[in-house]
Image (tube, grey):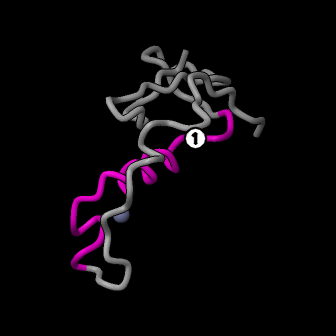
Amino acid sequence: MKKLIIKNTKQEPLWYKMNCTCKKNNVMESFPVKECLHCSYVMKEESIPKEQFFITDPKGKKKLITQITLVRGRHEEVIAWSMI
Ligand SMILES: [Zn+2]
């Protein structure tokens, strides 16, 4: 598969400066058991697709998605992406 074009990328989103609040050697004090914005944002960023993919439209027709646009939240974290 070919590389996906991703729009609205950021070199240094605001949340990169937010510290991880996990206690690394304690599962009960770490994400996802404990809330940690930094780690939840890392997880969201890692879930962004990197290669082109197919979707099926309401008429049952396959469509190749070649680019997406990231939607960002208040800390410039990725909250969603649209296929345009
Ligand atoms: Zn963390």
Q: Residues within 10 Å of mark 1 (few under 14, many from 20)?
A: some
Residue sitting at x 67%, y 33%: 52
- What span is in magenta? 28-52
Q: Is residue 29 left or right of residue 15?
A: left
**Residue 75: image x %, image y %?**
36, 35
Residues 1 and 42: in front is: 42
Q: Is residue 37 left or right of residue 28?
A: right
Q: Quadrant of residue 54?
A: top right
Q: Quadrant of residue 31?
A: bottom left
Q: Quadrant of the N terminus?
A: top right
Tell me: residue 56, above or below residue 59: below
Q: Quadrant of residue 39?
A: bottom left
Disc 1 secondary structure class: loop
Instruction: Say which residue label 1 marks.
Output: 49
**Residue 6: image x %, image y %?**
63, 28
Tell me: residue 14, above or below residue 61: below
Residue 44 in magenta stretch: yes
